[in-house]
Image: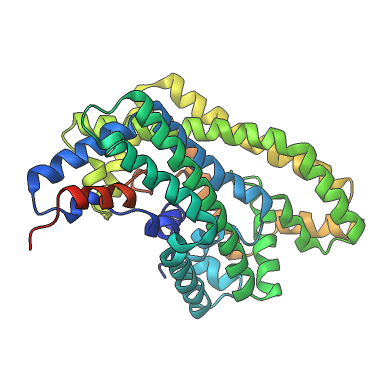
Amino acid sequence: MKTIPLPCLTAILLGGLMAAAFAQSDDEEEARKAREAQRAAMRTPAAQQMQKNTMSQMMGSVWNNSSANPMVMDWLGQDDFRTGVGVSVEQVQRIQRTMQNVGDNLPNEPALQPHHQALRNFMEETQGGPFAPNATEETQARFFELQANLHTRAQSIALEKLQSTINANLTPDQLKKINEFQISIMAENPMVSPGMFEALDLSAAQKNQLETIKKEMEPEFRRSIDKMTEMQWNLQRRVMDKARENGKNLEDMPESDEKKRIVGDIARNVLESDPEFHQEMREMMEGRGEISGKLRAKMVGILSDEQRRRMTDLIDNPPDHVKKMTGRFQNATESNSPWRPGIDSWQPGDPIPEEYRQHREQRFPRRQ
């Protein structure tokens, strides 16, 4: 079964916020110049930092939501996992349809209107913002600052709606099994979530203790997320630059098995050609495992004997669907390819925003 893969989830949720201006043009030369201007703007430090912030926000959301977070949608795309936790194809499709509607309606979200208006005003005042001829670095920086505010708020709303949609469409037993799954794979999963321990039927007092542990460990988790984001961003940029050197523009290539093969081959080549960076990737993954170990050790101190036995059994004697998923995590770790927003995933500012499309349409009406 195919579902919404994690790297594409935000693209679907936020796709309605953006429009490809060059796609609206009948002039191929104008379209080419628009693409070049966009790519140049996206290579500015302000734009790159905004993209890093988006990656960090998405990965960080896993810390706060266990059975209802973006990774769950990735897992539900694996038939063995989906059937293992007892979720039907129809349930997954309902979640997908709901989130597609969320994405379609997100541009009209009242909380986003002040951000849209600020961007529209800026584009009008600067006659095109960073895409105008001779746009200054200050103009580019201000544009991406405004756009970052819009995307951060929009993604926050989208992730909240994803959480509520998953909770509304899955049963308590299914959600519990998803949490049990996360306990089973905590040593291999680079994105650990403290809420998974609620699968052990925590008492009210234990839930309060879990919240205390979560607050104590959150700074360390955030630091690891920042490091992971920086490493993944570094690898992604290297892959895209290497592809361009080889005459391939990954940004223009449609999603396909061939594109995935190209990306994988280039990523391996990048890692093999830079042993120091390769080792940093390994250490980053090992550091993520240390956080899982610390969290587990702290939880042992608040669990009853029966709960500890249950946790140990989930880890030592997982069902078949867990074993299959564990194998995938281990393969990712061994190949130094942990989960990351992919080369083809949505990036803030890509494609050109609706505000620019409207501004451009006023200056260059489409030929009838």
Residue at point 18%, 47% (across, down): 363
Front position in the image: 190 or 112: 112
Quadrant in which residue 294 is drawn: top right
Q: Is residue 337 something that shows in the picture?
A: no
- The quarter of the picture where the C terminus appears is bottom left
**Picture coordinates of residue 162 (x, y %)?**
56, 63
Q: Is residue 293 above or below residue 276?
A: below
Viewed as shown, does residue 289 lie left or right of 284?
Answer: right
Viewed as shown, does residue 172 lie left or right of 245?
Answer: right
Residue at point 46%, 32% (across, down): 49
**Picture coordinates of residue 249 (x, y %)?**
21, 39
Residue at point 56%, 44% (across, down): 57
Residue at point 9%, 54% (across, down): 26
Colour basis: rainbow
**Picture coordinates of residue 183 (x, y %)?**
70, 54
Front position in the image: 321 or 228: 228
**Picture coordinates of residue 103 (x, y %)?**
44, 63
Quadrant in which residue 245 is drawn: top left
Front position in the image: 21 or 254: 21
- The quarter of the picture where the N terminus appears is bottom left
Viewed as shown, does residue 98 lie left or right of 178?
Answer: left
Residue farthest toward the top in the current orientation of the protein: 276
Q: What is the number of callouts on the image?
A: 0
Q: Is residue 241 something that shows in the picture?
A: yes
